[in-house]
Image (cartoon, rainbow, N blue to C red):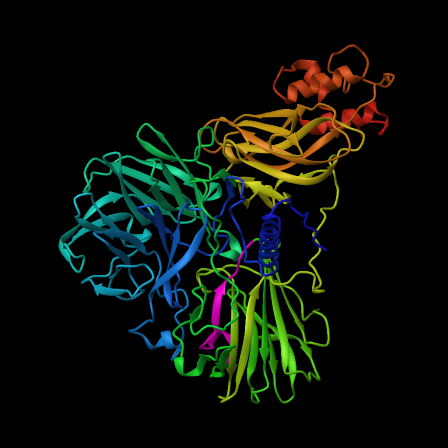
């Protein structure tokens, strides 16, 4: 129950009512939640601003507003335009493309066009008109134009096909088109006429560089900056004093593991700049991230000082005190138009769908399966976890109709109701995985939960007489640019029939993250199993990471590599027992190496040790390094934080800790293990051998021979381990 304290004076009741209204609005907002909200409400935000598939971003500022164009491939309406006041809070403003022409496969006749359509658009503004350049796959480049980003949009078709076109309008009003695909190893540019309806002159190569595409051209501080992606690797920048170049020197601004690889910069009203780029992020697709720009030696470096080259997870907002906004997601279907969040999969057949005023009516389209079904209505999945729910009335369906809610991507699946017999099915990759028979209700609820943190998707169903029930197994979500949609996983409302039908279903509503506490079986948050610190732990078995990548290891399995200064990996629930006194790791480096900082519970947590790594002569030339650690006990999250100079530092195959030693009574034995040659085997010998392994001193002669307790011809951490076990009386000898 809500209690409101009565105010003194004649305005007390009004104030109380105002408070009540605000609280009710907040409650409703929580009930009908949208998806990801980046703005924390305290002047900060979390990356990404849009936790969904908004790839190939192109961002400009016009006055006090920012506008972003993003790829939509075969979605219709296509080529989405978003609007923001602060680069953090975005709304969908419109779409440039109402339908695709030129190939009947866009109508799903004779095949499909997945991975084609419109991608890598570029937005610009001139004299009160917005322009968007895009090259539909297999067609000539188009320049769309409109006075308002909400439309209507028209377009001119240029004489050529320019891959990943960047539309750049100079301060004197002259327009150019920079373009190029990675296979060309160059970026070219051509000038446009005054109304951007045709090209003039011929193209010139303005940059020669391997595997570049997705170009963006920006003029800042009197210079021209050319941003290009090396796909899935890095974002690079070249500069020139003239728009035609030469663009000589090229530097890396950010790597794929540090934030992304295709983007550019945009100016703020106060004259500062922020960077933007998209990042490959698995099943969710390629969300766009932003970060402040630090100018160094005339270069726009991505990241704040001290964190150059890194796009961090949290920042202070670029512009303060703007309202919190998120793109629309839920839809009650009670309007005469679809919400801007919706896109049809390929061109729709407009004769087979309608809005009744209270519902979305989908007539069954003829298709052999979900992948080829026209009139499937989609919207983007949202991270980190989102659920989409529909309420349908299937009383008008006919035999063979398949009506339900799907997940469109790679892989794909759906939950749906069929007739004769009436049943509910769940599929993965068109294969039925589970069935509910003897369904009697015509009012059904279907739910799809997509958990992008563990890559699992689950389907649920209910009717008005029962609670939510999961149907079928979880589906492991993925992303396949080559054979899939080239998009992140999407919610999909579907109705198709392999044999044709005049049946239909009514969709009462779609709600994203709708009413909580309605007895849906939750996905339990996995609790990492405790791992003993004193057993060998493979480096690639981390629970989280920043900046690194895994690769095949010459010693078997995988290692972690591409490690740069400031990167880290996290291992949850490491059990240090009664304490640890040493650390060892298997490392390789083709450079001068760096340091491994051992921190507990956070990247800036207590430092328990620093393990130096020197060059080994190659990225797969392995050596074992060790270091002392301050005593740490119990259960902790272990952070390996990597420090060093510029470039890649080293690779790690595995690591482990030593347990706490007890000073025992020396046990006389032969000379084996007697590194100080004093006639006894004790902790002093162990410390000498450890210092030798760490290259802090050099044992020679008899002392070196005595240190090789396993007699394998080398003195390393294995000898340390054996000697420690011997001193602790855990083994009777070195044999």
Query: Residue 729: percent from the left, percent from the top?
Result: 86, 26
Say left or right for 46 vs 237.
right
Query: Residue 502: percent from the left, percent from the top?
Result: 49, 89
In this view, the residue in front, 230 or 705, is 230
Say left or right for 719 vs 238.
right
- Image quadrant assignment for residue 604: top right
Q: Residue furthest front?
A: 10
Query: Residue 80: percent from the left, percent from the top?
Result: 38, 60
In this view, the residue in front, 313 or 560, is 313
| 723 w.r.t. 577: above or below | above
Q: Residue furthest left?
A: 201
Q: How many marks?
A: 0
Say left or right for 590 vs 718.
left
The C terminus sits in image quarter:
top right
Q: Residue at x 57, y 76 (%)?
A: 404
Q: Residue at x 53, y 64 (%)?
A: 330
| 315 w.r.t. 54: above or below | above
- Residue 63 is inside the magenta segment: no
Magenta residues (range)? 368-383
- Residue 369 is inside the magenta segment: yes
Say left or right for 588 vs 244.
right
**Whether residue 180 can be seen here:** no
Query: Residue 53: percent from the left, percent from the top?
Result: 46, 57
């Amino acid at each position: 129950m809500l209690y409101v304290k009565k105010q003194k004076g004649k305005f007390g009741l009004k104030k109380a009512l105002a408070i009540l209204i605000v609280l009710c609005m907040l409650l409703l907002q929580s009930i009908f939640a949208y998806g990801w909200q980046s703005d924390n409400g305290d002047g900060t935000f979390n990356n990404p601003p849009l936790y969904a598939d908004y790839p190939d971003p192109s961002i400009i500022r016009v006055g006090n507003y920012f506008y972003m164009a993003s790829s939509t491939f075969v979605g219709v309406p296509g080529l989405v335009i978003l609007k923001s006041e602060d680069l953090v809070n975005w709304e969908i403003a419109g779409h440039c493309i109402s339908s695709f022409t030129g190939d009947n496969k866009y109508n799903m006749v004779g095949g499909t066009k997945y991975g084609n359509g419109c991608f890598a658009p570029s937005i610009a503004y001139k004299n009160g008109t917005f322009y968007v350049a895009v090259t539909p796959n297999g067609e000539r480049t188009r320049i769309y134009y409109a006075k308002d980003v909400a439309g209507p949009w028209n377009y001119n078709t240029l004489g050529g096909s320019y891959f990943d076109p960047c539309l750049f309008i100079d301060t004197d009003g002259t327009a150019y088109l920079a373009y190029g695909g990675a296979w060309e190893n160059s970026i070219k540019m051509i000038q446009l006429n005054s109304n951007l309806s045709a090209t003039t002159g011929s193209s010139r190569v303005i940059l020669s560089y391997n595997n570049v595409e997705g170009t963006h051209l920006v003029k800042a501080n009197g210079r021209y900056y050319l941003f290009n992606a090396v796909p899935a690797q890095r974002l690079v920048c070249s500069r020139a004093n003239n728009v035609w170049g030469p663009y000589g020197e090229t530097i890396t601004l950010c790597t794929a593991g540090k934030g992304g690889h295709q983007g550019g910069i945009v100016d703020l009203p106060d004259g500062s700049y922020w960077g933007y780029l998209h990042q490959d992020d698995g099943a969710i697709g390629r969300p766009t991230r932003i970060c402040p720009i630090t100018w160094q030696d005339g270069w726009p470096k991505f990241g704040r000082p001290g964190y150059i080259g890194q796009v961090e997870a949290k920042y202070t907002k670029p512009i303060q005190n703007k309202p919190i906004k998120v793109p629309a997601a839920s839809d009650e279907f009670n309007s005469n138009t679809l919400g801007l969040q919706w896109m049809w999969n390929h061109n729709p057949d407009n004769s087979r769908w309608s809005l009744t005023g209270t519902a979305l009516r989908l007539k069954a389209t003829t298709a052999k399966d979900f992948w080829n079904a026209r009139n499937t209505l989609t919207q983007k999945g949202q991270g980190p976890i989102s659920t989409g729910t529909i309420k349908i009335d299937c009383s008008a369906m006919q035999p063979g109709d398949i009506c339900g809610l799907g997940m469109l991507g790679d892989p794909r699946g759906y939950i749906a109701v069929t007739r004769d017999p009436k049943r509910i099915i769940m599929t993965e990759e068109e294969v039925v995985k589970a069935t509910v028979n003897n369904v009697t209700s015509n009012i059904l609820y279907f739910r799809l939960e997509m958990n992008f943190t563990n890559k699992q998707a689950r389907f649920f169903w209910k009717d008005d007489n029962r609670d939510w029930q999961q149907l079928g197994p979880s589906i492991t979500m993925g992303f396949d640019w080559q054979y899939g949609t080239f998009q992140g996983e999407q919610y999909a409302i579907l109705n198709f029939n392999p044999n044709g039908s005049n049946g239909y279903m009514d969709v009462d509503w779609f709600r994203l993250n709708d009413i909580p506490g309605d007895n849906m079986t939750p996905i339990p948050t996995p609790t990492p199993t405790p791992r003993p610190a004193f057993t060998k732990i493979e480096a690639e078995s981390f629970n989280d990471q920043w900046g690194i990548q895994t690769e095949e290891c010459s010693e078997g399995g995988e290692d972690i590599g591409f490690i740069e200064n400031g990167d880290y990996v996290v291992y949850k629930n490491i059990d240090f027992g009664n304490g640890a006194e040493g650390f060892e790791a298997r490392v390789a480096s083709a450079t001068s190496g760096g340091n491994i900082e051992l921190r507990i519970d956070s990247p800036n947590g207590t430092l328990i040790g620093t393990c130096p790594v020197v060059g080994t002569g190659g990225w797969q030339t392995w050596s074992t390094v060790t270091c002392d650690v301050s005593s740490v006990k119990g259960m902790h999250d272990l952070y390996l934080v990597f420090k060093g100079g510029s470039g890649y530092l080293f690779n790690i195959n595995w690591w482990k800790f030593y347990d706490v030693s007890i000073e025992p009574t020396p046990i006389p034995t032969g000379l084996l293990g007697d590194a100080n040659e004093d006639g006894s085997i004790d902790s002093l010998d162990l410390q000498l051998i450890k210092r030798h392994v760490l290259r802090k001193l050099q044992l020679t002669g008899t002392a070196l021979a005595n240190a090789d307790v396993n007699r394998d011809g080398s003195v390393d951490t294995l000898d340390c381990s054996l000697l420690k076990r011997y001193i602790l009386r855990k083994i009777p000898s070195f044999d």
